[in-house]
Image (cartoon, coloured by chain):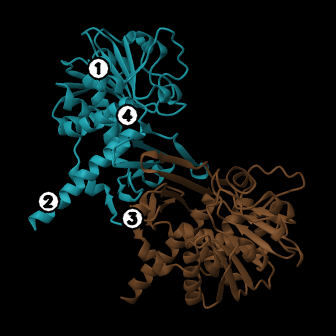
Chain colours: A brown, B cyan
Amino acid sequence: MKIQLYKRDEIERVIRLDTDLIQEVETAFTALATKRVTMPPIMRIDVPEHNGEVDIKSAYIEGVDSFAVKLSSGFFNNPEIGLPSANGMMILLNSKTGEPQAIFADNGLLTDLRTAAAGAVAASYLSRRDSRTAGIIGTGAQARYQLQALLAVRPIEKAIVYGRNEKKASCFKQDMENTLGISVQTADTPEEAVRNSDVVVTTTPSTEPIVNGDWLSPGVHVTAMGSDAEHKKELKPSAIDKADLFVCDTIEQSKRLGELREIHSGGLTPIELGEITSGHRQGRSSKDQITICDLTGTGVQDTVIARYAYHLLEYKEEDIHERR
Amino acid sequence: MKIQLYKRDEIERVIRLDTDLIQEVETAFTALATKRVTMPPIMRIDVPEHNGEVDIKSAYIEGVDSFAVKLSSGFFNNPEIGLPSANGMMILLNSKTGEPQAIFADNGLLTDLRTAAAGAVAASYLSRRDSRTAGIIGTGAQARYQLQALLAVRPIEKAIVYGRNEKKASCFKQDMENTLGISVQTADTPEEAVRNSDVVVTTTPSTEPIVNGDWLSPGVHVTAMGSDAEHKKELKPSAIDKADLFVCDTIEQSKRLGELREIHSGGLTPIELGEITSGHRQGRSSKDQITICDLTGTGVQDTVIARYAYHLLEYKEEDIHERR
C-alpha cells in the first residue's frame, strides 16, 4: 500500500486559489444536485476539559474513484499558548478498495481554500457581473481568502472592510492592499460596508445577526459564510425577507446550522447552489435583484478539494522525476 | 507541528501481543467503568457501488492527554483482486490542543491486537485459572490472535479448532503448532470443540447462531467476539440462558450489535467487563460457573492501543538516537 503524508508547506507550494480550484469546487455543488452522494451526519467528539471539539465530515460521490474523510478541530484555549484554535487534516481513501491514498496534515488550509472557492462560485452565479466594490465583514483568515476569491471572478477594484477590532481591520487593509493590489477602505460600521458594496461577504462567528434588510439596495449580493453551528447567525430576518433569491449549499444544513434556522418565512423558497451550477435553475436574472447565499460547508467540497490537491501533488512528483 | 506517519511494518517491529499490551487494554475497560468517557456513535460511510463501508470510531477519556480516531473499512470485493477486505488506520490527537500527533497506517493491525487483548482480559477474569484446553471457532486472523492471547494468561496446552472449511482448519493447526508450540486438533463440529474445551472463543462473522446451551458444561468460559453488527450472532439463546455470569464490553452495544440483540431473558443481568476489571464486581467466583463474555469492540480500546503503540515507537526512536 502506497500512502503519502503531505504537510501544509508542501501543499501550499502547489495549490493556488485560482479559477481552476474554483471550478473544481463548483463541481462539488453540481454533484450534490445531480449525483448520488453519501454524506453521513457530522461526527463530533467533545473535549470539554480543554474547551475543544473535533468534527468529522465525509462524502462519497457515486462514480468518483476516491473520497475524503476530514477531521477539523477547534480548541479554544490554544491562543493562550500561542497556537491557532483551528486545526485539521484530511484523509483521501480509494473508493474501490477503501485503502488510504494520501493524508493531508494541512492544518485546515484545504478547508479555508474550499470555503473561499465556494464564495467565488456563489458570487459568479449571483453577484452582478460588473461588481467592483466588495464589502467584507470580519478580518480573519477567511475574510482574506474570500476577498482573494472574489477577485478571481469579478472585476473588484475596491474593498470595504468592517471589523469590531480597529487594529485588525487596519492590518487587513494593509495586507490586502499589498498582496492583492486593490484599494481597501475600513468602515466604521457594518452598515457602511454593506451599503456601499456590490458584493458582500460576511465571515464572522457572530451569535447576534449583523446584516439588516434596510441596508440592502437593489443589485447587491450577500454571501454569509460564517454561520456553521446552532448558535451562530449573521443575517437578520429582515435581510432574508428582502432577498429576491435565497440560495444555500444545502437547505437541510442551512435550516439546522445556518441562516435559515428559526426562519419561518412563508414566501421564501430557498434553492440550492448546485441547482444553479448544474443549470437546472437560474442564478441572478436581473441587475436589480437582491441575492443571498448561505454557505455552511459540506463534505462534498472536502472530497473535491482533497482530490484536487492530490492530483497537483502527484503531478508535481512526476514532474520532478522527469526532470531528474 | 510534529506529526509522524507510521506504517504497518514499523509498528509490527515494536509491538507484541504480550502481558504488557493486555494490561494496557484492561485499563480501557476500567476507564469505561470509572472515568468520564466521550464515545460518540460510530460514523458510517457506505460505498454500495463497490460493496464497501468505512466505520469511524473515537473515544476521549477524561484526563488522558491524547485520543484516537479510527477509520476501519470493509471492501468486500477486494479479495477478487487479491487484497484483504479489511483495512484501517488510526490517528492520535493531542487532547489539549487537538493537534494530530501520529498516524498509524496499520492496515487494521492495532485493531486485531486490541481485540485479541480484550479476549485475554475476559479470559483472565472469567475462565478457570487451570484452563488447559482452548476451543477456537473460526480459522481467520483473529482466531490466531485470540489463541495467542489466551496463552499469555492461561496455561493452555492444547487447542481444538473448528472451521467450516477443512483446508483452512488444517492450515490453522499447522501454523499454530509451529508458531505457538502447542498441540492443535481439528474438530468435525463446533460442538466437539466447545464440549472438550475449558475456554472457548468464537471468532466468526456468522449470521446464524452457532453455540448451543447444551454444549456448555460446568466451569467453561466462552468469549464471543465475532458479532459486531446488526446481522451477526454466534450464541443461541439457550447458551445465554445457561450462563451464570454474562459479561460484555458495553451493554448498550451488546444489545444493539452483539449477543444481547433480541434477547429478552428476564433472569439475565448482564454486567460490563470494566465493572470487573475495576474491582467493583467479581468475575468467576467458583470452579463450576458457566461464564460468557460478549465483545463488540469499543473506541476506548482504540485510544488505549494507539497511545501504547505511540509510546513504543517514540521510545524506540529515542533509543536509536542514543545509540548513534
Question: Residue B67 appears at what percent x and percent y?
Answer: 38, 48
Q: Could you tell whether B317 is left or right of B201 in the image?
A: left
| Residue depth check, mark 4 versus mark 2: number of the one nearer the observer | 4
Q: Mark 3 lies on which chain?
A: A
* Numbered disc 4: secondary structure: loop
Q: Residues within 10 Å of mark 2 (few under 14, many from 20)?
A: few
Q: Residue A2 carries which label?
A: 3
Mark with earlier residue (4, 2): 4
Residue furthest toward the bottom? A181
Mark in front: 1 vs 4: 4
The answer to whether the residues at label 4 and label 3 have Cβ atoms under 8 Å apart is no
Q: Position of residue B43 (x, y in %)?
A: 54, 45
Read off the residue under disc 1: B126
- Please report the residue visible at 81 percent of the width from the left and 80 percent of the height from the top: A128
Could you say whether the residue bearing mark 1 is in a helix, strand or loop? helix
Residue behind mark 2: B319
Residue B103, picture quadrant: bottom left
**Callout 2–callout 3 Cβ contact below 8 Å:** no
- Front residue (pair B74, B89): B89
Q: In which quarter of the image is residue A173?
A: bottom right
**Marks 3 and 1, Cα distance to the nearest angstrom?**
42 Å
Q: Residue B35 carries which label?
A: 4
